Image (cartoon, rainbow, N blue to C red):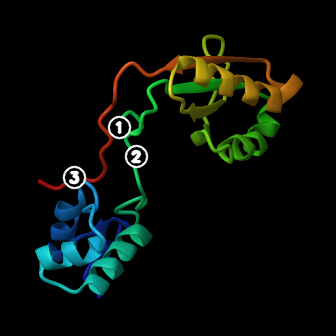
Amino acid sequence: MSDSSLTSDNRATLDEIDRAIVRATQAGLPLVPEPYQQVADEVGISSQEVQSRMQCMLDQGCIRRIGAVPNHYTLGFRGNGMTVWDVPDEKVREYGKKIGDLDFVSHAYHRPRHLPEWSYNLFAMVHGKDRSEVDHKTAQIAELLGDDCQAHEVLCSSRILKKTGLRIV
C-alpha cells in the first residue's frame, strides 16, 4: 500500500518508493514482457505493489495516465499533420468523438477559438506514410463533417517533439 497522501490543500505527496517508481518509469515502462516486474526488481518491491502505487498516483493526479506513446516516425508514418477544424461549438464534442474513432487519428480534442486570428475549435492528429496520404485522410474528415465544416487547415509536423511526463531528478 502506498504511503502517498494528500496534504491539507489537496496536493499529493510522494514517499521515497513512489519517487523511485517515477524515476524508474519516467522514460517509459520497460519494453519487456513483464514491465511492472522489472520496475519492481529495480525498486525492491513486488510488481503488485508497483501497480497499486501507480494506480494511487493516477487517482491522486500525480500522474495523468499510463499509456503507449508511439513514435510515429519510427513506425513509418512521416506525413503526420495536426488538422484544425472550425465546426459549430455545440457539435464539437460529437465530432471530436467521431473523428477520434477513425483508425488514422491518434487523438482529437477541443480547443478554444481565439477570434479573430484563430477560428478553429477542433484539433485532430492525422497520421500517414506521406503528405498526400494525410491530405486524402483529411478529405475524409471534411466529408464526415459536411456543411458543418466552415474551414480547416493541416499543420504538418516538421520535427519530433520530445514527449515527456512527470520527471524526478
* Residue at position x 29%, y 88% in the image: 1
Q: Earlier in the sequence, mark 3 or mark 2?
A: 2
Identity of the residue drawn at 36% across and 61% down: 63
Residue type at the position of mark 2: Pro
Quarter of the rendering containing residue 109: top right
Which is in the foreground here, disc 3 or disc 1?
1
Residue drawn 11% across and 53% down?
169
Q: Residue 36's spot in the image, x, y percent? A: 28, 74
Asked whether residue 37 appears in the rendered view, the answer is yes
Distance between the alpha carbons at the discs numbered 3 and 2: 19 Å
Which residue bears the numbered disc 3?
A: 167
Asked if the residues shown at circle 3 and circle 1 are in contact, with their CB atoms under 8 angstroms apart, the answer is no
CB contact under 8 Å: marks 1 and 2: yes
Which SS class for mark 2? Answer: loop
Q: Nearer the viewer, mark 3 or mark 2?
A: 2
Q: Amino acid at mark 1?
A: Thr
Look at 23% across and 56% down and name the residue there: 26
Q: Distance of mark 3 from mark 1, alpha carbons? A: 24 Å
For the residue labelled by badge 1, is the local secondary structure a helix, a strand or a loop? loop
Q: Nearer the viewer, residue 95 or 141?
A: 141
Q: Secondary structure at mark 3?
A: loop
Q: Provide the residue designation for mark 1.
A: 74
Question: Where does label 2 land, which residue?
Answer: 70
Label 1 CA crowd tier, 10 Å (few <14, some 14–19, many 20+): few
Label 2: how many Cα within 10 Å (few below 14, some 14–19, many 20+): few
Which circle's residue, 3 or 1, is located before the other in the chain?
1
Q: Name the residue nearer the viewer: 34 or 107.
A: 34
**Front tag of 1 and 2:** 1
User: Mark 3: few, some, or many residues within 10 Å (few <14, many ≥20)?
Assistant: few
